[in-house]
């Protein structure tokens, strides 16, 4: 379970406060779209949920446990094992193959290379980019790169997947593909229930999300 | 993250970002080559100088009974030679002239030394056997002058008043630093006679002062005025001074080269960290710990540093070979190790900087 309680965040001490004591429980097995006007902290909320930013006040609860003030090493470990990230620009390593990018979180989680690569190939196949496993990110399309990013977010089988504007740079067809991948990751197609949170201002994503959290 | 996977990541990163890799490689290679060519050459020259200063000829303590008071008894000689700071030594009598006994008193004269102690300390037997009481050994030069074809026969003291002779039982060549004996004859000094001088080859020149004091203490009754001492004490002091100066110079040069090299490696690594901030931020976001990031950056620097150390050491050795002063292997391997350590230490501050940067700020900066 992923939840926030009385959450407030400010980038600087005494600066503008975001979320104003937000309390919300994100439903496992559902895609929750976080939306709102620009500057309201959609991406920031994702980074707080992803334990990369520490809230000014309030708590981030992951499986009933308050993890928002955990030590850096603990938060890194939680990111590697329980949280998957999909960045807006896919953020794949341009110098490595697609498969190498996909297995990266699994290596940080302590998996063996063989196990990680097998899991990575399986996910790439499920997302329709298995043939691109040994290609460089520069050799795949934007839509394919974003599906690779989804595969990377899922490689350690995390309980939470956070996606920051995952369709922001994609056309409708590719956005549909990425959204379908995220829905499948949430388990809405009958698979394992995950909490998927998508920060977006894309009406198409909002239309297809299971829940919407407006900031 | 598993250690070997960190190494694999470091290798992949080093291969992917070739400019900093080549720069670190060249810097470490230059550090090693420059150190070996300058400090190594100095160390080699220092070693050669030390070898020269520490040769047997520079380690001889000679104590002579100037007035012939019988102060250097065989017991004193034995005890002096037995000191822990003594490598070897003998007691000798004042040389006398001898002639070939077969030819007679008009024959060519050569000097003969009566020796107390182990003759092997001053001579290497080349033929025959070591002499006993009343016997002698000769050098090739002495045989030529005495008119002997082989080291057999007898020699007699060149005197019309004193009758003394020795059977020749072998030939020898003198050992360093007893080259004076190359022209003559050695015979075993009578056991009951006090010696005229004591020659002690010290283990090191540094031991001159203490050995000299010990030898003087052995003489009973103490009679420093009756003794003439030739000691390498001042030579030992000079040796200390010269080696101290050279070591200080070498150390300063070594620190200078390694320090400058490490600074440049740190700058290259920091630039690489700044250029790859998005890569490092992504790694942090995906679960890499700060320790993993620090290790990755340090290993990523060490990979080309290793290649550079191998290249630089080889180049340095080839260079010093051309200059004729190859430093010892301990120095070259030590230099390579120090250069690697310097590169690793230089990579730590940029690695700490990379590990402690806010990943969100890095990821959101275009």
Image (cartoon, rainbow, N blue to C red):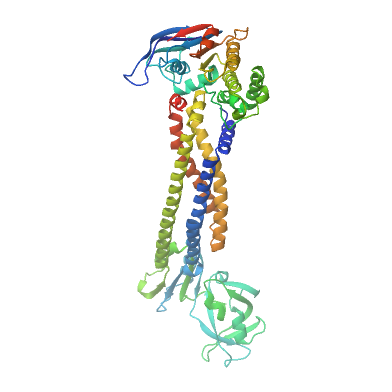
Question: Which residue is at a point 44% across and 11% down the rendered structure image?
Answer: A36
User: For this view, does A132 lie left or right of residue B94?
Assistant: right
Question: Which residue is at a point 59% across and 26% down the rendered structure image?
Answer: A101
Residue A6's image quarter? top left
Query: Residue A35 or B157: which is nearer the viewer?
Result: A35
Question: Which residue is at a point 47% across and 31% down the rendered structure image?
Answer: B277
Question: Which residue is at a point 42% across and 67% down the rendered structure image?
Answer: B235
Query: Residue A74 or A160: which is nearer the viewer?
Result: A160
x and y, in percent, of residue B239 in the image:
43, 63
Q: Is residue B316 above or below residue A210?
A: below
x and y, in percent, of residue A139 in the image:
62, 29
Quarter that holds the N terminus of chain B? top right
Number of dots carrying numbers: 0
x and y, in percent, of residue B123 in the image:
57, 72
Query: Residue B13 or B343: which is nearer the viewer?
Result: B13
x and y, in percent, of residue A133 in the image:
65, 26
| Residue B209 seen from this side | no
Q: Residue furthest right?
A: A131
| Residue A99 seen from this side | yes
Q: Is residue B179 above or below residue B42?
A: below
User: For this view, does A65 lie left or right of residue A137?
Assistant: left
Q: Residue furthest bottom?
A: B106
Residue A158's image quarter? top right
Q: Is residue B353 above or below residue B178?
A: above
């Amino acid at each position: 379970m992923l939840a926030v309680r009385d959450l407030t965040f400010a980038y600087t001490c005494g600066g503008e406060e975001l979320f104003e004591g937000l309390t919300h429980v994100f439903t496992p097995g559902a895609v929750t779209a976080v939306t709102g006007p620009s500057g309201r902290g959609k991406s920031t909320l994702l980074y707080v949920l992803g334990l990369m930013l520490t809230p000014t006040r309030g708590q981030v609860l992951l499986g009933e446990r308050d993890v928002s003030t955990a030590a850096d090493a603990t938060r890194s470990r939680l990111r590697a094992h329980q949280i998957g990230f999909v960045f807006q620009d896919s953020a794949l390593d341009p110098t490595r193959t697609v498969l190498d990018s996909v297995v990266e979180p699994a290596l940080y989680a302590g998996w063996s290379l063989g196990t990680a690569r097998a899991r990575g190939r399986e996910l790439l196949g499920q997302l329709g980019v298995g043939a691109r496993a040994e290609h460089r990110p520069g050799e795949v399309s934007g839509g394919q790169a974003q599906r690779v990013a989804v595969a990377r977010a899922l490689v350690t089988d995390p309980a939470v997947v956070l996606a920051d504007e995952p369709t922001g740079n994609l056309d409708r067809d590719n956005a549909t593909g990425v959204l379908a991948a995220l829905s499948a990751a949430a388990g809405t197609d009958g698979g394992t229930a995950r909490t998927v949170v998508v920060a977006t201002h894309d009406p198409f994503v909002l239309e297809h999300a299971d829940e919407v959290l407006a900031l | 993250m598993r250690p070997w996977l960190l190494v694999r990541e470091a290798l992949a990163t080093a291969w992917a970002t070739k400019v900093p890799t080549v720069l670190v490689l060249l810097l470490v290679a230059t550090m090693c080559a420059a150190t070996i060519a300058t400090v190594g050459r100095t160390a080699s020259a220092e070693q050669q100088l030390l070898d020269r200063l520490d040769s047997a000829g520079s380690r001889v303590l000679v104590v002579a009974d100037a007035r012939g008071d019988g102060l250097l008894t065989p017991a004193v000689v034995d005890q002096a030679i037995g000191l822990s700071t003594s490598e070897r030594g003998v007691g000798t009598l004042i040389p006398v002239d001898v002639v070939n006994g077969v030819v007679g008193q008009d024959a060519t004269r050569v000097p003969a030394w009566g020796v107390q102690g182990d003759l092997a300390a001053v001579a290497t037997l080349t033929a025959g056997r070591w002499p006993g009481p009343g016997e002698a050994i000769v050098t090739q030069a002495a045989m030529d002058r005495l008119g002997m074809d082989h080291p057999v026969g007898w020699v007699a003291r060149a005197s019309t008043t004193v009758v003394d002779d020795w059977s020749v039982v072998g030939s020898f060549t003198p050992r360093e630093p007893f080259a004076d004996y190359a022209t003559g004859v050695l015979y075993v000094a009578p056991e009951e006679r006090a010696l005229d001088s004591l020659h002690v080859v010290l283990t090191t020149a540094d031991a001159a002062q203490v050995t000299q004091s010990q030898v003087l203490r052995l003489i009973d009754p103490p009679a420093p005025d009756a003794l003439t001492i030739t000691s390498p004490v001042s030579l030992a002091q000079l040796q200390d001074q010269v080696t101290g100066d050279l070591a200080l110079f070498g150390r300063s040069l070594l620190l200078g080269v390694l320090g400058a090299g490490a600074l440049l490696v740190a700058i290259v690594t920091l630039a690489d960290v700044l250029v790859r901030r998005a890569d490092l931020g992504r790694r942090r976001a995906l679960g890499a710990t700060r320790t993993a990031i620090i290790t990755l950056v340090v290993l990523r620097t060490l990979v080309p540093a290793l290649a550079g150390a191998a290249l630089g050491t080889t180049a340095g050795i080839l260079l010093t070979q051309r200059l004729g002063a190859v430093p010892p292997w301990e120095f070259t391997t030590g230099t390579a190790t120090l250069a690697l350590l310097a590169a690793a230490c230089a990579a730590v501050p940029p690695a700490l900087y990379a590990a402690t940067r806010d990943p969100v700020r890095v990821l959101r900066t275009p």
